[in-house]
Image (cartoon, rainbow, N blue to C red):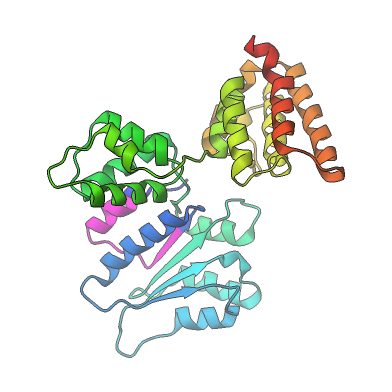
Amino acid sequence: MNQSISQIMNSLKNGAVEPIYILQGTDKYLQQFLSDKIADRFFQNSKSDKSLLIPDDMKGPEIIEQITATDLFSSKKMFILLEPQKISGQSRKELLSYCDKPIQSNCLIIILEEFGKNIAMVRELTKRFTPTNVSSPFENDMKKWAQYFFREKNIKINTKVLNTIVEMAGDSVGHISNEIDKISILLDDDQELTDDLVRQFSGWKREHQRWEFFKYLGNKDLEKSLKIGLSLITQNETMLTLIYPLTSFFQELLFAKLPNSGVLGRSGYVPLSNSIVKSLPQFAKKYSRNEIELALKLLGEIDIRSKTTTVSNESEMTKFLFNLLESNDR
């Protein structure tokens, strides 16, 4: 079970800085944001001494030497370690030993972008510490972040403005932060921030995330599944990158159709967001077994075509969704 950023922030406000933090998730902005907040509290009025440790650039023994070095002057040091799963052999054992008995005057922030328990380092670290979730938030939490940034800028907003910001820049916390930074610069003193001004100031085109696509697919909403599916294709996805999570999605729905399946109690990694995994039982009720088997058959055919011929990702996405959902949409 992960803890939230707000829990860490509240702990930092009370003056508590732990010798080790595990940040788990791929949102670069949140990784940087929380690391900076921890550093601000850790160093306070003292000189900042931070080191970024990257296994691709440094050998394991060098990383361990930096982390475990003692300072005659007892000055505070902070280390930010990326991709710890790339540390192997004796160095891995020494890192885990350090985690068991860290130097209390220092602070080590370990950033995990992996979630699978089948990865030894992820398993060992999450067994020792409760990770803080730095994955991109869902819509409701995006609204909370927008409110937080507006408060930081002392800008008063109404619900319509809040909804517009999330609609236009809610694909990541970083985009929302940048938008509100820009608004704070362009907004005149004592000028009321309106919905029209937000749209006038905004330059972001909203991107979508996989969980949104799977939510509408799970609810058999053809129009929105198609809109977001094609949006994903124009961003950085292809049908080939989506086949694995799509196949897993429908395999999980098929499993849910079996008597006493207990989907949520299954072990092993499922390449779907937590919110989608939790909704699988509800989604399974909307699909017949024949429809699920049809989806898996169509995905198998797309997989073969994608690996053997030149295909149009937009065409494959459109045909897949129409073949599966069109009768439901009539």
Residue at figure coordinates x 62%, y 34% from the top left: 230
Q: Position of residue 273 (x, y in %)?
A: 55, 39
Vertical placement of residue 236 versus 263, above or below: below
Indicate whether residue 15 is drawn in magenta. Answer: yes
Identity of the residue furthest to the top in this view? 330
| Residue positioned 57% across, 38% down in the render | 210
Is residue 280 visible in this depiction of the protein?
A: no
Location of residue 39 with respect to 240 vertically, above or below: below
Tell me, yes or no, whether the highlighted magenta stretch contains residue 85: no
Magenta stretch, residue numbers: 7-22
Whether residue 55 is visible here, answered yes or no, is: yes
Tell me which corner region of the image, top left, top right, bottom left or bottom right, holds residue 303.
top right
Q: Residue 12: x and y, percent? A: 27, 58
Residue at 29% over, 89% down: 73
Q: Is residue 235 above or below residue 66?
A: above
As drawn, which residue projects farthest toward the front?
200
